[in-house]
Amino acid sequence: MRTITGVTISTSRRQFEVGWKVNGVVSKQGYGRWLNYLVGFSLVGVLAACTQPVSSTGPVELDSRYNDEQPALSGNGRFLAFVSNRNETRAILMYDLKQQQFLNLPRLNRQDAIAESPSLSYTGRYIAYIASDSARPEIELYDRATQQVQVLTPGYRGWFRNPSISPDGRYIVFESGTRGQWDIEVLDRGSNVELDAPDFQRASPALLGFPFDPGGHSLNSSSAEMTPRIVRQYIVFASDRNGSQDIYLYDTTARMLVDLPGLNAIDMIASNPAISDNGQWIVFVGGREGRSGIYLYDRTTRQLRNLTENLKAEVRHPTISGDGNIIAFQSSASGQWDIVFYNRFGQPLNRENL
């Protein structure tokens, strides 16, 4: 077991400068009045510097004329995190589907780094994501309760991508390039962290070891393992270990692969899986004959459904709510990347009904 230690907290500061000019002259009689204005505006500046802005009180439209990508639903289905360039920089945004408004994320997005690949815990308190600056990417954790950022991979050797946080906020899985190929690593934040609850306690995150099997019967193999997602004891991921890119499910408690009869097909390339909190439904992108679709697999009935069979668009990055009732994904139907919502029966959902 390798242990990763170290914490980085990013901060931001605003500076305010106020000046006045009245015909180039301030009269002796008006000096007191301008002094009062100066003091008043200075106090406003101090308060503005110390107080984070609040969210809009009215409904705000989610769609924009910019590309919105990489959607991630919270386990309770209320919050959506995604990547957008609508603010003239590539940043992570968070939207409350119930209140229909954006939430402020102070200190998460920085001007010197690009944030992407967000993943939410069950109530959306924790956000795991990749932050890339001019040096190298890091996996970071944002706590909405404390508005603090923790770097989870300081000193980590190797490249990584596609982090996913467990619903309780304790575990993060991600792709690692340490061995010269993409493997899956599991990071444990520690037993003393608050599990998606108000008070946050820092711990030293540690990488958990899982068996490596070149024959392809464990979590990692001699082939590439991609886009892992974790819920409870399950890790769902894509791998080309059997000569084609398929979806796999690994039970971290039993330390073995779980059979998925009827999910993978010889004529389909499967990628970007996500799984409901109870492990019953698996959603993923399936590619057939140059066309992509969002597929939903029911582990109980062993049924596979193409949710977007009638949607004439390219689709990417599906995400599913904890109860399996809401699926969100990227769609190019409008000529740009937008985020759309379906239920598990393949019916489009209006945001007012989410």
Image (cartoon, rainbow, N blue to C red):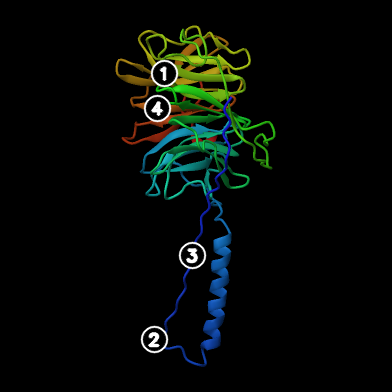
Mark 3 belongs to which amino acid?
A: Gln
Q: Which residue is mark 2?
A: 23
Q: Quadrant of the N terminus?
A: top right
Sequence-wise first label, 3 or 2: 3
Q: Nearer the viewer, mark 4 or mark 1?
A: 1
Label 3 SS: loop
Q: Nearer the viewer, residue 211 or 28?
A: 211
Q: Which residue is mark 4?
A: 316
Q: Can you see residue 185?
A: yes
- Along the horizontal axis of the image, is 93 left or right of 316? right
Mark 4 belongs to which amino acid?
A: Arg
Question: How many residues crowd mark 2 within 10 Å: few (<14), some (14–19), many (20+)?
Answer: few
Sequence-wise first label, 2 or 1: 2
Q: Which residue is mark 3?
A: 15
In space, the residues marked 1 and 3 are separated at their CA atoms by 48 Å
Sequence-wise first label, 4 or 3: 3
Label 4 SS: strand
Sequence-wise first label, 1 or 3: 3
Q: Which residue is mark 1?
A: 224
Q: Nearer the viewer, mark 1 or mark 3?
A: 1
- Most extreme residue toward the bottom is 28
Q: Quadrant of the C terminus?
A: top right
Q: Nearer the viewer, mark 2 or mark 1?
A: 1
In space, the residues marked 2 and 1 are separated at their CA atoms by 71 Å
